[in-house]
């Protein structure tokens, strides 16, 4: 009976080519509503429509069951198909790929994974750096954009362009490079051990060592942007930006040599601390005219941070006692650290709007000789020489050497005795006798006037 029923239904069904049937009718979605306006009767829209047009078409297709019409429905449906149907099919196929391709290039170039909250800071810093570079390129005059063999006049801009050509690495690529570096180091150690190696094994080890060096360079070049993002936080502290970058690169090299991929951490998270250490050590050694030890620089920086925070909280400058309570040190220690943190000022610093005077012009020289004192000292020397002329040659010589009246260097009794060939006791007697003569009013009265 089942076979008869199937044969009967097959004989009663019309030609499938003429009538699509209920299945085809159900699978064919209704055409999307056409918006009223001047474009209602226009020919089909070009396939180079804007993204907004594709989005609206896709939404219209989803509203009508979200399925594309089947081939049977498009061929056997009653009447001619709507002219917009092919565009809808194309939009539905292309749209997911367009969403995947349209990515902000600045995010790709500048997204550096530092771990925890540092990712946002570094991404913002790098985006700001690129934005500044673009503004410089737009606002710079033609004379400032001199190029020679493709290089601009700004070395920082050239460096950023060069390091931007190397793509960033993901975690899997970092692990792969770290394994190659480790294998290269092992191969170099094996080659330098002095063991007897076959030519084939030696050649293979040399190739592995060279591959390790290439992997090391690749890992370094892919993380140079991380150094730039961290170096920007230390600008304006006595060192040039490029010098900070170079010091940070030294820390990056150290991080590559010490990185252990088996710990499971991202390389950028590990390298951040080595880069910061290299930059801060360089600033402590080179940024100041008077070198301060690294541990004291850390105390100075901590004091400065606490002082700024308390200034915002209190609305005034904190006292040494308040800073001491916050830093757990004595007020005397706070004052001492503040003295260490003072920057030296050049005496040739120009002052005023015109810069016609210097800072040194306003500072009194406490060691300079006053003209009146210089004249008085010259007269005293003349009077003292006249008084010594009233003494014998030996007495005048002993007193002059004993008090350093000739060369400014006082001599001992033994030294004077060796000059005259007598004992120190005889020199002491001559000195005592001569001083008694000088205290006589006939000689001392002339000299007393210079002591008042």
Image: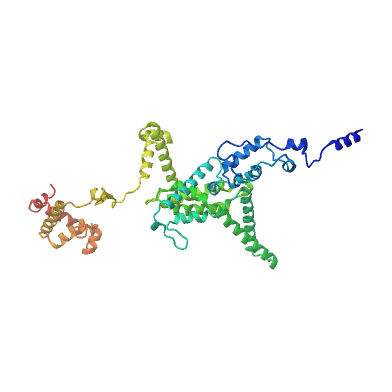
What colour scheme governs how the chains and residues are painted in the rendered image of this protein? rainbow
Q: x and y percent of residue 49 in the render?
A: 58, 45
The N terminus, quarter of image: top right
Q: Is residue 188 visible?
A: no
Residue sitting farthest toward the right: 1
What residue do we see at 59% from left, 43% from top?
42
Q: Is residue 134 left or right of residue 17?
A: left
Q: Is residue 421 left or right of residue 111?
A: left
> Toward the viewer: 40 or 423?
40
Q: Is residue 117 visible?
A: yes
Residue sitting farthest toward the left: 442
What residue do we see at 69% from left, 37% from top?
29
Up-down: is 100 above or below 435?
Answer: above
Residue sitting farthest toward the top: 314
Q: x and y percent of residue 254 in the render?
A: 54, 53
Q: x and y percent of residue 108 in the render?
A: 56, 48
> Toward the viewer: 150 or 411?
150
């Amino acid at each position: 009976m089942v076979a008869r029923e199937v044969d009967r239904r097959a004989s009663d069904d019309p030609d499938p080519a003429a009538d699509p049937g209920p299945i085809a009718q159900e699978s064919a979605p209704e055409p999307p509503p056409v918006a009223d306006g001047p474009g209602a009767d226009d020919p089909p829209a070009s396939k180079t429509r804007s993204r907004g047009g594709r989005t609206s078409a896709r939404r219209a297709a989803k509203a009508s069951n979200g399925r594309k019409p089947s081939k049977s429905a498009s061929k056997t449906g009653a009447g001619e198909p709507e002219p917009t149907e092919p565009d809808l099919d194309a939009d539905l196929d292309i749209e997911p790929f367009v969403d995947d391709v349209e990515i902000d290039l600045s995010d790709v170039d500048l997204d550096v994974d530092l771990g925890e909250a540092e990712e946002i800071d570094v991404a913002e810093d790098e985006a700001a750096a690129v934005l500044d570079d673009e503004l410089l390129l737009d606002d710079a005059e033609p004379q400032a954009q001199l190029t020679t063999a493709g290089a601009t006049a700004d070395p920082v801009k050239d460096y950023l362009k060069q390091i931007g050509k190397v793509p960033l690495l993901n975690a899997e690529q970092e692990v792969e490079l770290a394994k190659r570096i480790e294998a290269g180091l092992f191969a170099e150690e094996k080659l330098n051990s002095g063991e007897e190696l076959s030519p084939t094994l030696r050649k293979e080890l040399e190739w592995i060592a060279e591959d390790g060096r290439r992997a090391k360079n690749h890992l370094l070049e892919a993380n140079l942007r991380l150094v730039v993002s961290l170096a920007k936080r230390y600008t304006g502290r006595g060192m040039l930006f490029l010098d900070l970058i170079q010091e940070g690169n030294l820390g990056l090299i150290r991080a590559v040599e010490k990185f252990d991929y088996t710990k499971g951490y991202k390389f950028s998270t590990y390298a951040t601390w080595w880069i910061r250490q290299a930059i801060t050590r360089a600033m402590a050694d080179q940024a100041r005219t008077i070198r301060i030890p690294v541990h004291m620089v850390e105390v100075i920086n901590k004091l400065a941070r606490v002082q700024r925070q308390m200034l915002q909280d209190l609305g005034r400058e904190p006292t040494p006692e308040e800073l001491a309570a916050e830093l757990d040190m004595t007020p005397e220690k706070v004052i001492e650290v503040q003295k260490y943190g003072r920057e030296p000022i050049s005496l040739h610093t120009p002052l005023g709007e015109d810069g016609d005077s210097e800072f040194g012009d306003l500072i009194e020289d406490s060691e300079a000789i006053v003209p009146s004192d210089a004249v008085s000292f010259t007269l005293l020397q003349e009077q003292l020489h006249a008084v010594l002329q009233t003494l014998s040659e030996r007495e005048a010589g002993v007193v002059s050497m004993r008090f350093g009246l000739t060369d400014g260097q006082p001599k001992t009794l033994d030294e004077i005795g060796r000059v005259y060939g007598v004992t120190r006791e005889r020199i002491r007697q001559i000195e005592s006798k001569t001083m008694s003569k000088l205290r006589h009013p006939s000689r001392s009265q002339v000299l007393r006037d210079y002591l008042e």
